[in-house]
Image (cartoon, rainbow, N blue to C red):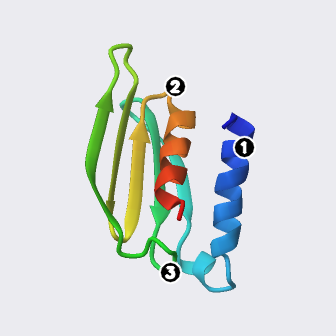
Amino acid sequence: METRDLLSALSAWYADQCDGDWEHEFGVKIETLDNPGWLIQVDLPGTSKDGVTLAPDVEEGTDGSWLHRSADGRILRVACGPKDLERAVRATLDFLSP
């Protein structure tokens, strides 16, 4: 999936959650980390993944790339290296897909 398609898919998932209530309390955050890297956090309550957990999973590349993901049933967290944002969005969508 191309970058544009990944962003469209994430946007569509978010839009599908917005029901007049959910978006006032929950949402999706994408921010930078100081190590450096990126962090994507998705609130799961009220979605089809509410209560679904994901054991911490770590992928470390030899070229400095990395990806960490976990979900505690309330929040999905996907963190990655500074050049791995596309990979992190893909991992986020993989978890959120039915």
Tag 1 or tag 2, which sits nearer the N-term? Answer: 1
Q: Are marks 2 and 1 in contact (CB under 8 Å)?
A: no
- Left or right: residue 10 versus residue 31 is right
Tag 1 or tag 3, which sits nearer the N-term? Answer: 1
Where is residue 76 shown, x and y percent of the image? 41, 59
Tell me which amino acid carries mark 1: Asp
- Residue 55 lies, with reference to residue 19, above or below; the image says above
Tell me which amino acid carries mark 2: Lys
Query: Which quarter shows the N terminus?
Result: top right
Q: From the image, tell me which residue sits under label 1.
A: 5
Q: From the image, tell me which residue sits under label 2.
A: 83
The residue nearer to you, when weighing 57 against 82, is 57
Disc assigned to residue 46 = 3
The residue nearer to you, when weighing 74 against 25, is 74
Element type at marker 2? loop
Where is residue 51 shown, x and y percent of the image? 35, 75
The residue nearer to you, when weighing 82 against 58, is 58
Mark 2 or 1: the one toward you = 1
Tell me which amino acid carries mark 3: Gly
Q: Are marks 2 and 3 in contact (CB under 8 Å)?
A: no
Q: Residue at x 48, y 45 (%)?
A: 91
Which residue occupies the extreme bottom position in the image?
21
Where is residue 60 shown, x and y percent of the image? 31, 26
Tag 3 or tag 2, which sits nearer the N-term? Answer: 3
